[in-house]
């Protein structure tokens, strides 16, 4: 069993290094992926940031929301890479080799998580440059980063499943439109209390909102927890939602991948 596990881990790391090697050949795409959320942070913070319903400085509310929203960015690159490998027959060649059948997807997701961690580091640095401060302690910071990466991992497997359903690179742009509303239909930029009642209630149950609210609370932003059950239990939902998404889409993606050659 230990030999088999070591073999699977070796295959997964080989596929991860393959994906990371693409960074050297596509540096512009990597840089754009890092800059895009920074541009949104600056745009909403200084050009469009009204801070509807926010008590205190808007930047303290906005940065945690943008950290959560960043976890939805860049999925299209992963989706595009999966569909390109499918279209070019790369995955078929991998499947003909003596390697773990899940290594291709795991390697892709691991490389994506590295880039997501780097993006978080950049966003936190930019937030500090704009005057945002973390007041929740180092342990709370690690907990917040863990929740953010857990959300990314869940969104990633949703993206991989959608990519394999799409099948072709030209369909990715149409399919990824389904992912964006999850991010913008959230409390990243404004409080649910400032929205119409039905909309605010729906927004509070968005997985992105749960993570954003939990990160705000961990960061020490005062007065951001409303009296609703979803807001008061944001820490719980920030774990339950991603775990539920992973439990749903991970086996679907792996099962669809294994069935490609049947």
Image: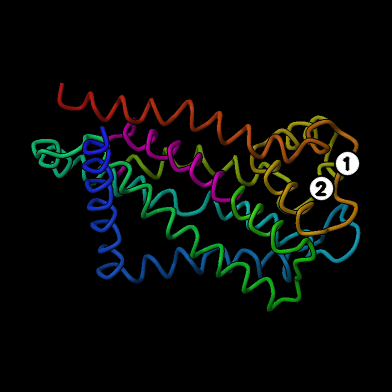
Front position in the image: 39 or 71? 71
Q: Residue at x 51, y 40 (%)?
A: 179
On residue 226, the disc is 1
- Regarding mark 1 in the picture, which secondary structure is present there? loop
In the image, residue 123 lies at what x, y percent? Answer: 60, 67
Q: Quadrant of the C terminus?
A: top left
Q: Are marks 2 and 1 in contact (CB under 8 Å)?
A: yes
In the image, residue 228 lies at what x, y percent? Answer: 86, 33
Q: Quadrant of the N terminus?
A: top left
Left or right, 97 with respect to 189, comes to left
* Numbered disc in front, either 2 or 1: 1
Q: Is residue 46 magenta?
A: no
Report the magenta residues as a range: 148-170
Measure the C-alpha gap from mark 2 to mark 1: 9 Å
Number of marks drawn: 2
Q: Residue at x 48, y 66 (%)?
A: 34
In the image, residue 200 lies at what x, y percent? Answer: 80, 36
Left or right, 6 with respect to 114, comes to left
Q: Residue furthest top?
A: 262
Query: Picture quarter containing residue 201?
Result: top right
Q: Residue at x 35, y 30 (%)?
A: 253
Query: Picture quarter containing residue 95?
Result: top left
- Regarding mark 2 in the picture, which secondary structure is present there? loop
Left or right, 41 with respect to 196, comes to left
Front position in the image: 208 or 3? 3
Along the polypeptide, which appears first: circle 2 or circle 1?
Answer: 2
Query: Picture quarter containing residue 47?
Result: bottom right
In the image, residue 33 lies at what x, y percent? Answer: 45, 63
On residue 191, the disc is 2
Majority secondary structure of magenta residues: helix
């Amino acid at each position: 069993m230990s030999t088999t596990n070591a073999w699977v881990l070796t295959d997964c790391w080989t596929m991860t290094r393959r994906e990371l090697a693409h960074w050297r050949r596509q540096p512009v795409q990597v840089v754009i992926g890092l800059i895009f959320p920074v541009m949104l942070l600056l745009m909403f913070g200084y050009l469009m940031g009204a801070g509807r319903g926010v008590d205190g400085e808007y930047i303290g509310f906005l940065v945690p929301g943008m950290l959560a929203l960043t976890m939805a960015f860049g999925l299209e690159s992963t989706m595009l890479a999966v569909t390109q490998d499918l279209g070019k027959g790369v995955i078929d060649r991998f499947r003909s080799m003596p390697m773990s059948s899940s290594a291709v997807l795991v390697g892709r997701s691991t490389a994506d998580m590295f880039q997501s961690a780097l993006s978080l580091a950049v966003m936190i640095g930019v937030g500090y440059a704009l005057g945002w401060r973390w007041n929740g302690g180092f342990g709370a910071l690690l907990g917040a980063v863990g929740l953010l990466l857990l959300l990314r991992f869940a969104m990633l497997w949703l993206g991989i499943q959608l990519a394999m359903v799409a099948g072709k690179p030209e369909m990715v742009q149409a399919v990824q439109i389904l992912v964006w509303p999850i991010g913008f239909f959230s409390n990243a930029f404004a409080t649910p209390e400032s929205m119409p009642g039905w909309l605010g209630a729906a927004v509070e149950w968005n997985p992105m909102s749960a993570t954003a609210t939990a990160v705000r609370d961990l960061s020490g932003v005062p007065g951001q927890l409303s009296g609703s059950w979803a807001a008061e239990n944001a820490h719980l939902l920030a774990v339950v939602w991603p775990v539920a998404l992973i439990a749903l889409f991970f086996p679907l993606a792996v099962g669809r991948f294994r069935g490609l050659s049947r």
